[in-house]
Image: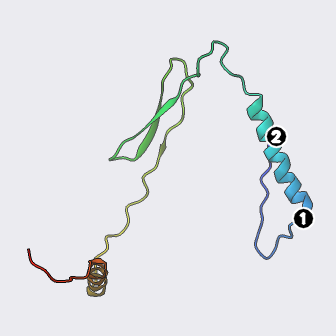
């Protein structure tokens, strides 16, 4: 059974028992589908995937630990470059005051 997503809008959607039942039915169907998934007959764990991210491009890829494992599509996880930010005098003052406030109080003594 395919799950059909419902859309709820604040101030417009009246939540009814049918909505909640729809969600419950979807959760139950997902659990049944998981329970019915085949497991390896040979006692192996079926393998695993190791993620890898290219630091320059942000491309995420997956490598299977066993031969014959299905390919997993990659994705680019690097967001767009933001605008540079220049600290204002107010920013610098706030940072300095925060650091100074976190320092322990000097109780005297010598080094």
Q: Secondary structure at mark 2?
A: helix
In the image, what residue occupies the spot 49% across and 43% down? 75
Disc nearer the start of the sequence (1/2): 1
**For the view shown, which residue lies furthest in the top direction?**
42
Is residue 75 toward the left or the right of residue 32 in the image?
Answer: left
Q: Is residue 99 above or below residue 29?
A: below
Q: Residue furthest left?
A: 111
Residue positioned 59% across, 22% down in the render: 46
* Image quadrant where one finds the N terminus: top right
89 or 61: nearer the viewer: 89
Number of numbered discs: 2
Q: Is residue 88 above or below residue 68?
A: below
Give the image quarter of residue 32: top right
Q: Position of residue 73 (x, y in %)?
A: 53, 36
Residue at which label 1 appears: 16
The residue tagged 2 is 29
**Under tag 1, what secondary structure?**
loop
């Amino acid at each position: 059974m395919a799950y059909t997503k419902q859309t709820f809008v604040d101030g417009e959607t009246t939540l009814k028992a049918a909505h909640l039942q729809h969600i419950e039915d979807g959760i139950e169907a997902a659990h049944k589908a998981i329970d019915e998934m085949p497991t390896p007959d040979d006692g192996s764990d079926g393998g695993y995937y190791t993620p890898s991210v290219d630091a320059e491009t942000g491309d995420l890829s997956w490598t299977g630990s066993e031969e014959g494992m299905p390919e997993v599509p990659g994705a680019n996880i690097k967001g767009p470059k933001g605008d540079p930010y220049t600290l204002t005098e107010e920013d610098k003052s706030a940072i300095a005051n925060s650091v100074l406030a976190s320092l322990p109080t000097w109780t005297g003594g010598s080094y």
